[in-house]
Image (cartoon, rainbow, N blue to C red):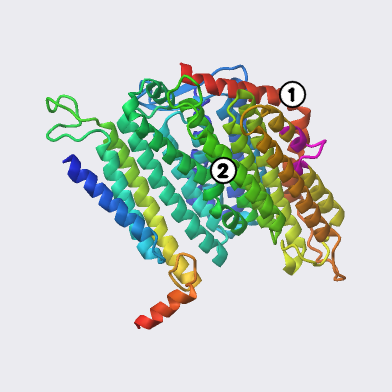
């Protein structure tokens, strides 16, 4: 399987392009089925790639067979395969959920969905910094479309902010790229790392300023503290199913930082070792703080879910910034857990709010839901998993996060913030749950019952949580080896 | 030439950022366009500035770095598409929100200022 590395990009591209054909435009059912077939192929390719890399192989795929530092390079290693597989799992659940009504609200949901997947997978697989920019734009322009999906005032307002911010981010990204190219003469990530280590000290400040700009751009995508203001309004304005898909988007920002900074600056031999790590620790901690306050103070469940996404971003940053392979491995594992559970939360909130009539997702007294036992149990499970209670994946993910940062200047703070934030999440979610299911008024329930397909999507996402525990040993080994594989690239 | 290009990039960036901080979507859009011009010039200059040398080997005795030209082309195309999208989005925002403020509504002080002018 020589072409395995490019399949997760080509399959969604072809699916999306074909979905634009007139035959699919008229027939909703056909569109759904075809989209599902494309997605099934994508899942297959992603898992083949995952299995392929678990032996430790690194595929460096040269597009058009140009020689390494010049052409476009795709890198399929453990980390990229892990994220590609995670995207495949998440997107299947999102597709399943959307195929019960949400994709009817506009003609282009399915093509945009696949273009988005193409951009996300491309960003994970690329080994070239300019190509990363291109895939960022692909995923952004489809995310603009998806965010607007369904229409409405709130969405337009959120979209204007989101689009303007990201266009500014793209401009800064290009500035950083041009600066790096001007100084280093290459845009291939591993080649650049080599050239940085041979850099003339008088030019180091140029690389530093470019790296600062990259940190700004990726931080904007990942929504770390001073750049997070778009997140809660965007995620709560989007359709819940779109917000669930966006749960992977902050991880794209995080992944880019991991990919670029661990190769450029993390090893001690580099002249610019540990650049930006202090800043990431500090702002990561502040993000955790802000997100926990946000979780406690959210007036509605969707804002609460958005702040949960923010919380996971903060935790990822502080742990990554501590720099050891164990910490990066733990962060990867936590990224899987938090993406799946965050998405599950968005979908579940949608199911609950549909049954509460006019009150919707607001955390006030309202009519009882039609399926209190079922939804209550699902909410309880996801809350326990997110807060980090055993026997769900949150417990081992957070435990491993904490275990991996036992040394270093920041570790006391990290422990305190992560533990306290978990407590605050627990309080906020138990309060939300008791409001939703117990503090109900005397009205009869609305009679709206959640459809089987939507419930199945939520079951699948929540089911990943115990699976992450059952296969925890293997997956943690994989994450650890992925982190090890990530770091030595800088020596080559 | 270096001085001229750097002044040009600086002025464009400066105007772009100033206009992006204005409250109306139209000016913000123009600001972003200016910023992207500045960025494109910057990418173009990142390969080094030379006169009278071609990007194709053998055409001229001396040659320039062809990669920034390829990069700037990509950046222009993407920037163009994004600006087109932003124009449509702004028009839709104007239609749905009833005004062209980036936040969808004017602050009271801004409204008073507008009325004072009329």
Q: Residues within 10 Å of mark 1 (few under 14, many from 20)?
A: few
Chain letter for the residue marked with disc 1 in the picture: A
- In magenta, the rendered stretch is A385-397
Residue at x-position 50% and y-position 21% = A268
In the image, is residue A211 above or below residue A407?
below
Looking at the rendered structure, the secondary structure element under dot 1 is helix
Q: Is residue A396 inside the magenta stretch?
A: yes
Looking at the rendered structure, the secondary structure element under dot 2 is helix
In terms of image quadrants, where is residue A370? bottom right
In the image, is residue A387 above or below residue A446?
above
- Check disc 2 and report the residue beneath it: A283
Q: Position of residue A389 (x, y in %)?
A: 80, 40
In terms of image quadrants, where is residue A340? top right
The answer, for residue A351, to whether it is visible in the render is: yes
Image quarter where the C terminus of chain B lies is bottom left
Residue at x-position 72% and y-position 42% = A461
Q: Nearer the viewer, residue B46 or A49?
A: B46
Q: Main secondary structure of the magenta part?
A: helix
- Check disc 1 and report the residue beneath it: A473
Left or right side of A377 for A344: left
């Amino acid at each position: 399987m020589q072409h395995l590395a490019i399949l997760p990009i080509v399959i969604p591209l072809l699916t999306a392009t074909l979905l634009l054909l007139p035959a699919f435009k008229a027939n909703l059912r056909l569109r759904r089925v075809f989209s599902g077939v494309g997605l099934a192929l994508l899942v297959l390719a992603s898992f083949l790639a995952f299995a392929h890399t678990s032996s430790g192989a690194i595929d460096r795929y040269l597009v058009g067979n140009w020689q390494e530092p010049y052409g476009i390079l795709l890198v399929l290693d453990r980390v990229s395969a892990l994220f590609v597989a995670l995207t495949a799992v998440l997107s299947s659940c999102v597709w399943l959920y959307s195929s019960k009504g949400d994709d009817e609200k506009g003609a282009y949901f399915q093509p945009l969905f696949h273009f988005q997947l193409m951009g996300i997978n491309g960003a994970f697989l690329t080994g070239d910094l300019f190509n990363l920019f291109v895939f960022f734009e692909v995923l952004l322009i489809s995310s603009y479309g998806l965010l607007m999906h369904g229409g409405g005032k709130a969405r337009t307002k959120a979209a204007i902010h989101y689009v303007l911010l990201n266009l500014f981010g793209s401009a800064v990204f290009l500035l950083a790229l041009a600066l790096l190219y001007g100084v280093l003469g290459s845009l291939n990530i591993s080649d650049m790392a080599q050239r940085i280590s041979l850099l003339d000290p008088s030019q180091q400040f140029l690389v530093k300023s470019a790296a600062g700009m990259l940190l700004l751009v990726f931080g904007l995508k990942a929504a770390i503290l001073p750049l997070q203001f778009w997140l809660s309004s965007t995620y709560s304005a989007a359709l819940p199913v779109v917000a669930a898909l966006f749960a992977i988007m902050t991880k794209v920002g995080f992944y880019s930082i991991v990919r670029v900074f661990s190769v450029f600056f993390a090893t001690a031999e580099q002249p610019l070792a540990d650049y930006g790590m202090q800043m990431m620790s500090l702002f990561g901690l502040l993000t955790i703080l802000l997100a926990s306050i946000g979780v406690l103070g959210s007036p509605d469940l969707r804002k609460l879910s958005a702040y949960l996404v923010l919380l996971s971003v903060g935790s990822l940053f502080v742990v990554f910034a501590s720099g050891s392979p164990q910490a990066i491995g733990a962060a990867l594992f936590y990224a899987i857990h938090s993406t799946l559970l965050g998405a599950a939360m968005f979908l579940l909130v949608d199911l609950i709010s549909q049954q509460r009539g006019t009150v919707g997702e607001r955390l006030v007294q309202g009519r009882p839901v039609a399926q209190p036992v079922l939804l209550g149990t699902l909410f309880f499970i996801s809350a326990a998993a997110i807060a980090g209670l055993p026997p769900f994946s949150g417990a081992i993910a957070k435990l491993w996060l904490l275990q991996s940062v036992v040394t270093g200047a920041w570790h006391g703070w990290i422990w305190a913030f992560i533990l306290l934030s978990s407590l605050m999440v627990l309080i906020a979610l138990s309060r939300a749950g008791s409001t939703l299911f117990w503090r109900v008024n005397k009205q009869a329930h609305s009679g709206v019952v959640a459809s089987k397909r939507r419930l199945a999507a939520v079951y699948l996402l929540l089911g990943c949580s115990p699976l992450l525990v059952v296969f925890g040993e293997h997956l943690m080994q994989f994450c650890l080896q992925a982190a090890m594989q990530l770091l030595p690239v800088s020596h080559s | 030439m270096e001085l001229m290009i750097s002044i040009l990039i600086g002025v464009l960036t400066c105007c772009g950022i100033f206009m992006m901080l204005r409250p109306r979507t139209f000016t913000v859009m123009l600001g972003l366009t200016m910023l992207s011009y500045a960025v494109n010039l910057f990418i173009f200059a990142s390969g080094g500035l030379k006169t009278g040398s071609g990007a194709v080997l053998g055409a001229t005795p001396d040659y320039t770095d062809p990669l920034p030209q390829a990069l700037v082309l990509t950046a222009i195309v993407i920037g163009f598409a994004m600006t087109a999208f932003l124009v449509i989005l702004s028009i839709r925002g104007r239609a749905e929100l009833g005004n062209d403020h980036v936040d969808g509504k004017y602050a009271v002080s801004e409204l008073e200022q507008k009325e004072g002018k009329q």
